[in-house]
Amino acid sequence: MNWRLWIPLFAFAAFLGLAAYQLTQPKDEFVESRMVGESLPYFELPPAMAGVNGIGSTDFADGEPRLLNIWASWCLPCIAEAPHLENLKRQGADIVGVAIRDRPEDVARFLAQHGNPYSRIGRDDLSEVQLAIGSSGVPETFVIDGQGVIRYQHIGDVRASDVPVLLAELEKAR
Amino acid sequence: MIAELGLAALWLAAALAALQMAAGFLALRDAADGALAGLIRPAAIVQGVLVTLSFAMLVWLFAVTDLSVKLVASNSHSMKPLVFKLSGTWGNHEGSMLLWVMVMGLAGALIALVERRLPERTMNATLAAQGVVSLGFYAFLLLSSNPFERLPVPATEGMGLNPLLQDIGLAFHPPTLYLGYVGLSVAFSFAVGALLTRQVTPDFARAMRPWVLGAWVLLTIGITAGSYWAYYELGWGGWWFWDPVENASLMPWLAATALLHSASVLASRDALRTWTIMLGVVAFSMSMVGTFLVRSGILTSVHAFAVDPERGTFILALLGIFIGGALLLFALRANTISEGERFALASREGALVFNNVMLSAILAIVLLGTLYPLLTEAFDVRVSVGPPYFNPVGAIFTIPMLVVMAVGPLLRWRQDRIDRIGKEIALFAALVLAALILTSLLADIALLPLLGLALGVGLAVASLMPLRRRKLARTPLATWGMVTAHFGIAVALIGMASESAFTSERLAAVEEGGSTSVGPWTVVLQGVEPVAGPNWTAIQGRVSASYDGGEPVVLTPQSRNFWAPPQQTTESALVTRWNGQLYAVVGDRSPDGRWQLRLWWKPFVTLIWYGGLLIALGGVLALVGRVLSDLRHRRLAARIADRRADREALS
Amino acid sequence: MIRALAFAAALVVALPVAAQQTMPPAPFAYRQLENPAQEQAAQELMETLRCLKCQSQSIADSDAPMAGDMRHQVRTRIAAGESPDQIRDWLTKRYGDYVSYKPTVSTTTWPLFAIPLLLVLLAGAILLRRFGKRK
């Protein structure tokens, strides 16, 4: 018996095992941010529409943990998550928004229609903040602690089941 | 009624595949059983007819847009041009699998009809193996992807075909690849048959060779066409990105190339027996792995088409049975097969073995780079492997391969001296060096394109050298085939190197009437107007371009909006000159009213695809040459047998 | 080739979103840098960065708005004097190795480099075994 002749079969079996394992895994297309655990990079964003405040990274270092919500008026899942953000706000969360590639009039229309859970909304036309904190899509929600350190990333729209998770993460960041 | 007829034919064909398999294996165990063995060939032939009938029924359903059939309703549309209705038959998972089994059935019928060179036992084993493979695919179709499924209520209108597929190039690109895959499945059946009866002979290689050649030609055409299609359709001028799906089509080609050369050694020199068998198994397994990767959707980038984990599971199971079985058989049997004739390194076989090893290494690199992200994902780490990895790492093996490819065909079989072809080697080396020095002096280009250009020039000349001192009219077709294919490699290589070294790009926002330039071209945007097609509307730029101040040519790049299904595509416009292509795309309008123009001047880029076509043409010449000489041998053998029979009758 | 289908699939997903997006692209998404050497450096870098929204394309060949914003980042950073490697590092610090098509030797990617080396040795061994012993 020549052991070398068995190598192809074993290599193939390894491939088969890997492929079978991957087939059973749920496919997630999420790209997780590596910035969790890091301080927010410096940024300064103008207000996304008239009558709201813009945001800067220094606003986060006041001892209070916050949610940072990356969203846009043109994003369909953002409509779905709007009531859950409202719910978070009702339960005491301070949510700041970053509107990606958005016009002030569209932002205003969206908020009039779906409610405004945000205490401040910054306007990010070039996805600069989004890229700086390692977010790869809209919507995404980050938990930032009172020292301005990113503690948690939620990818995709916030659903009802995510609300307690985010509240707990906020509590942890306190 | 038509759909039911198609389904019935498919079930019958599957039953015959089962018969072919069972009779084949039983006859193999009990060689004396002539009755069973007699069933095998007819079963294969009738199966081929039935599955063809089934496919014809599906084409008919698509031609008349029968919306009570689920597959038609979800992939076609009554408003579509007829040619795309027909190509829609195989532009989806179920239809393409039916096309696959049809060609497989026809291939089986063809070998059952004409292949008489092999011992009957090996032939039975081969057809039995073919039965197993076919049966697997029939099961796949009938149990999990029935193309003839009816809707409970007929749809009022179809969902339409993906607009990107509504392109004549793409209508025929996937089937070309499938036909190549099927050709490799026949080679696989031959390899398994020979392994079962331990008759790995030159005759086996000769019987297998036309199938490998045919598959290789189709894969070459498929990859070439696909690359050109991606180049002009995607709107960014890229022709190869080492994307998993592209790699999935390249891997079988690499394996088939190696198999082709080792089968040649086996056919003419009775050497490399186990190696040829192994490559026969590997080549088909690569086409199955490719199909699996494309259709299961387990690779992040592969949204390809018909992605469905359930189908993925089925293909994986088939893959496990076919390839696992064959490799097990190989492990058990291969050491009872002797190596065959020996030969020296400095010989034609030596060069072929060297390049076989290089091709296998390249294949391993492509496989590794393609599957590696899958492996790390199992540990929750995501990585990307792209051109900056594949190009240099692949080059480690490609460069020695190209050098050996230049001189190998000049060597004699079995044993030769390098110094006998010293002059030719010197010429090749001088050409490569001269090109290297000249190019690096004239232009500042990266190392890999530089080496590519130099080796391409050297190889272009060296590949013609086997024709020296030969009477061209009496040179066998197969030799012409080899020369053409090797020359095609050189041509494609020069095109690739030139494209990556000398492309110039211009992105510009231009107002109507404004002008810009790219490379030697001056480009004027004369106007932008809306146009409409049968199932799309578009904005079309009228762009006039003049080369070096010469006569202007008008191009009309479009940005199309299809409505069934709604989707946007860019239609690039090309101006082809002997020395390259101008590539123009019209983009969006900026707020100040100017239009985005994307322009590229790509010197000698067309050589990439001309090279690909030359390679395929070389394969066709070799195939025709081999088949003709087989026929001649067959006639000769028949005449000798006749004469002997006459003589015996006389005495 | 079939990557195009991937692209098609991505488009189908992206279109309802893109259709409503009316903002002009970032200034340097579709504009080249004045300095040809800088533009070439930017172009070479962009060809090796992954578009995070489209899964199978570099940011240099994607019309996705986020790819445009990433091109803008690359070009403005190059223009500001950053080296391509610094920009790549900046991005991998945020998105991990996934964002770069150019794997570097690390604890997770070493087999990508070890296996080719092994293949060189293996190829050498096979050829030696076959031709080495005899004349």
Image (spheres, coloured by chain):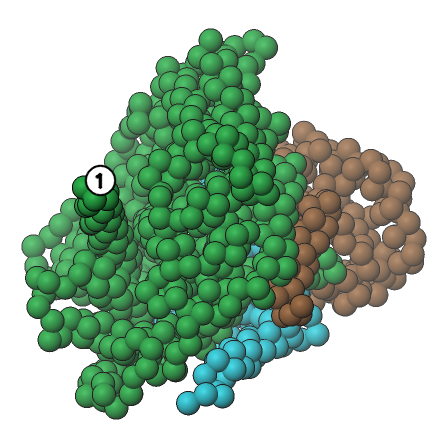
Chain colours: A brown, B green, C cyan
Q: Nearer the viewer, residue B119 or B242?
A: B119
Residue at x 52% of width, y 82% of height: C129
Q: Residue at x 66, y 53 (%)?
A: A16
Secondary element type, mark 1: helix
Give the residue at x 44% y 44%: B120
Image: B567 above or below A56: above
Tell me the quarter of the picture where residue A43 sits.
Answer: bottom right
Q: Residue at x 70, y 48 (%)?
A: A20
Q: How many marks?
A: 1
Where is residue B592? Give x, y as percent. 36, 47
Is residue B222 or residue B647 the one in the foreground?
A: B647
Is residue B287 at all visible to an observer of this figure?
A: no
Q: Which residue is mark 1?
A: B649
Q: Residue furthest front?
A: B651
- The quarter of the picture where the C terminus of chain B appears is top left
Q: Is residue C51 left or right of residue B175?
A: right
Q: Pinpoint residue C66: horizontal percent, then vertical percent.
A: 54, 52
Residue B471 visible at all = yes
Q: Residues within 10 Å of mark 1 (few under 14, many from 20)?
A: few
Question: Is residue B90 depicted above or below B375 in this figure?
Answer: above
Chain identity of mark 1 = B
Front residue of A80 and A62: A80
Q: Is residue B9 above or below residue B407?
A: above
Residue B151 sits in which quadrant? top right
- Relative to residue B235, is residue B332 drawn left or right? right
Amino acid type for the residue under numbered disc 1: Ala
Provide residue B303's location: percent of width, then percent of height.
54, 44
Q: Position of residue B143 (x, y in %)?
A: 62, 27
